[in-house]
Amino acid sequence: MWRFLYQALLLAAWPWVHVRLRWRARREPEYRERIGERFGRLPASVRAGPVWFHTVSAGETIAAAPLIGALGDRFPGTAWLVTTMTPTGSAQVRARLGDRVDHCYAPYDFPWAVRRFFERVRPRLLVLMETELWPNLIAEAARRDVPVLLVNARLSERSARGYGRLGGLVRAMLGRIRVIACQYPDHARRFVALGAAPERVRVLGSVKFDVALPADHGERVAALAQRWGLAGSPVWIAASTHPGEESLVLAAHERIRAALPGTRLVLVPRHPARADEVAALCRQHGLGVARQSAPAAGDAGADVLLGDVMGELLYLYGLAAAAFVGGSLVPTGGHNPIEPAVCGVPVAMGPHVFNFPDVVELFRDADGLAGVTSAAELADRVAGWLRNPDAARAAGQRAAGVVARHRGASARLETLLAGEIEAVSTIGREAPGG
């Protein structure tokens, strides 16, 4: 019954798909491009017979890129395909993996689009990152004997409740997945409770803890500090912010500036396409704005430094003595606090952290992350760190220690995936996935 209902809902959604793409394109013009790929019409450059990674968006792509690169070195004769669903994810594939992999958008889960994709690509292996569970995609892979692995898998309590309402549809889908490599034991238990076979579920940790500072990190941070005239100024960062959250951040910044005149804010909206909107909001608060994407003569005097360039967040965190990670003062679920921790920066987050409860708890237990519930609390916490650099550095080092203690998931996943790739590579068939 659930499968029939799912297909009926897809059919009902079909007329609205192009409308939604056009609506998204008003803010992010890239959504107008390559629409055919979303329905299985792929460019000739995409090779048949690859190992296929699906990484959804920018965060998953950034986390998966070192793993894909290591496997590419290990299996130099293998074709690789990385798909995403968003333009920001697409940009990260090109920036981090370049021509080492083929790339296109993944098909929407319409049965005919999925079939067309598989007939064209004929993958040998499908690796899904995190929690990309699409019934028709996984069913088509099973029909064509393409092994499916779900890696770096996470399943929050909230998501598990939602999947649990779909009963047999989810049990059938999980039954078709060869291995589910989870980030944490609680996630593994939730997958098993939903119907995954316990012997197929493993706990390998999160690859996001394996993020490393780029070799040019210090040099690039110094160049940004010089460009924006940050020498001698207290600096804090609010990153991955969402609509409704920037107003709270700017209210906190005004309170901080009242206590510590000359404090500068690096503000990084989650979606760079919102940069114009966020810049206008800053000016409404009477604050001067410098945009990373558009250097100007007055940048060194700006109150707010707007990070509107994809893939630069690690460098921007390096400028700050304190960080707020967004999506957490509004009910978005929060974003990952690992990147500021890698930079040794203490972190504050709001109460809405249901996307990363396990990670947040690790940092809280180590006293490397502070919870705040309002603009006033955020201001007090950040101002306290800015007034006391020694305390801020100590909290940042405690956060960095959490990252160091939880590294290693990428190596474990590489071993797992290498075995699966070797297995499918020995199958002598002319039409992989056929």
Image (tube, rainbow, N blue to C red):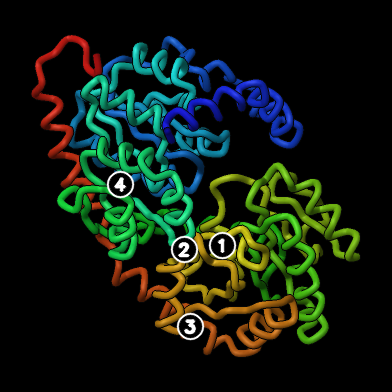
Q: Are marks 4 and 2 in contact (CB under 8 Å)?
A: no
Q: Residues within 10 Å of mark 3 (few under 14, many from 20)?
A: many
Q: Secondary structure at mark 4?
A: strand
Density class for disc 2 (Cα within 10 Å; few <14, some 14-19, many ≥20) is some
Q: Nearer the viewer, residue 212 or 173?
A: 173
Locate the C terminus by quadrant: top left
| Discs 2, 3 touching: Cβ within 8 Å | no
* Circle nearer the viewer, 2 or 3: 2
- Residue 106, horizontal then vertical, whole percent: 46, 27
Element marked by disc 3: helix
Q: 225 and 80: which one is in front?
A: 80
Q: Are marks 4 and 3 in contact (CB under 8 Å)?
A: no
- The front one of 364 and 167 is 167
| Element type where label 1 sits in the image | loop
Left or right: residue 377 versus residue 168 is right
Which disc is residue 356 wearing? Answer: 2
Mark 1, residue position: 334
Residue occupied by mark 4: 151
Q: Nearer the viewer, residue 258 or 334?
A: 334
How far apart are the two marked residues, 2 and 1, measured between alpha carbons? Answer: 7 Å
Q: Quadrant of the N terminus?
A: top left
Quadrant in the rendering for residue 262: bottom right
Q: Residues within 10 Å of mark 1 (few under 14, many from 20)?
A: many
Which of discs 4 and 3 lies nearer the camera? The answer is 4
The vertical placement of 240 against 4, above or below, is below
Residue under the image location 40 percent in, 33 percent down: 135
Residue 225 visible here: no
